[in-house]
Image: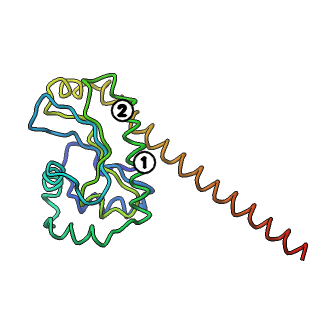
């Protein structure tokens, strides 16, 4: 595991992308705490890259992308070129797995959250070559959540939940790859038998 920072410091979006790509990362998880206008709300959300479906998501993306130097028009052009790529499919699978891990790990410890896997044009997700997601682990604008987040126990529970989601994704991808290898081997044996019978 590689962190983009060890302490309380600002790392630009471009630098985060560069760190992940230089390390040839297998996957990338950007961890955030949300801040909502409704201070009673709590949200546990995991995003993968794509076109936003609603105004609030567009607002969040504009806020997160503020130091990227890219305008929303540029994002729309890039989204159009992205298409249904393997990276996007894998990022969706990772997002679902991370979201499931978060819900299992933190839902019973906090006020009931609004939950979702969503799509948004976060530049940090676009630039990383590996499957990548952005996880909003809680809302610091919610007073109860802010108090919990200040405790090592709660942060540890969130970290463990993220780990569970990542491990589940990696295990699932390994099983799919293993299944594909087995299928190729059995197909090859069938072809060899057919050739021998000719």
Q: Nearer the viewer, residue 164 or 81?
A: 81
Question: In the image, 98: left or right of 196?
Answer: left
Direction bottom: furthest residue: 198
The quadrant holding residue 99 is top left
The residue carrying mark 2 is 103
The quarter of the image holding the C terminus is bottom right
Crowd around label 2: few <14 · some 14–19 · many ≥20 (10 Å) = many
- Residue drawn at point x = 30 percent, y = 64 percent: 127
Q: Nearer the viewer, residue 14 or 174?
A: 174
Horizontal and vertical percent for residue 132? 36, 55
* Earlier-in-chain disc, 1 versus 2: 1
- Residue drawn at point x = 42 percent, y = 48 percent: 1
Question: In the image, 179: left or right of 34?
Answer: right
Horizontal and vertical percent for residue 12? 20, 57
The residue carrying mark 1 is 1
Measured along the vertical axis of the image, is residue 69 above or below residue 114? Answer: below
The quadrant holding residue 85 is bottom left
Question: In the image, 193: left or right of 167?
Answer: right
Q: Nearer the viewer, mark 1 or mark 2?
A: 2
Work out how far the residue at label 1 is from the one at label 2, CA to CA, in angstroms.
22 Å
Horizontal and vertical percent for residue 43? 23, 35
Circle 2: element type: helix
């Amino acid at each position: 595991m590689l962190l983009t920072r060890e302490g309380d410091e600002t790392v630009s979006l471009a630098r985060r992308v560069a760190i992940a790509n230089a390390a040839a990362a297998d996957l990338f998880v950007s961890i955030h705490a949300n801040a909502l206008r409704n201070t009673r709300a709590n949200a546990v959300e995991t995003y993968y890259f794509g076109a936003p479906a609603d105004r609030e998501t567009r607002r969040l993306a504009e806020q997160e992308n503020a130091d990227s130097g890219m305008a929303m028009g540029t994002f729309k052009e890039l989204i159009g070129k992205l298409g249904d790529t393997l990276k996007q499919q894998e990022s969706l699978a990772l997002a679902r797995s991370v979201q499931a891990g978060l819900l299992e790990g933190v839902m019973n410890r906090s006020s009931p959250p609004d939950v979702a896997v969503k799509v948004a044009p976060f530049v940090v997700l676009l630039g990383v070559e590996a499957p990548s997601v952005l996880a909003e682990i809680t809302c610091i604008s919610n007073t109860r959540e802010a108090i919990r987040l200040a405790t090592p126990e709660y942060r540890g529970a969130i970290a463990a939940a993220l780990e569970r989601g990542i491990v589940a994704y990696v295990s699932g991808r390994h099983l799919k790859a293993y299944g594909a290898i087995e299928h190729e081997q059995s197909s090859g044996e069938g072809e060899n038998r057919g050739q021998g019978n000719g």
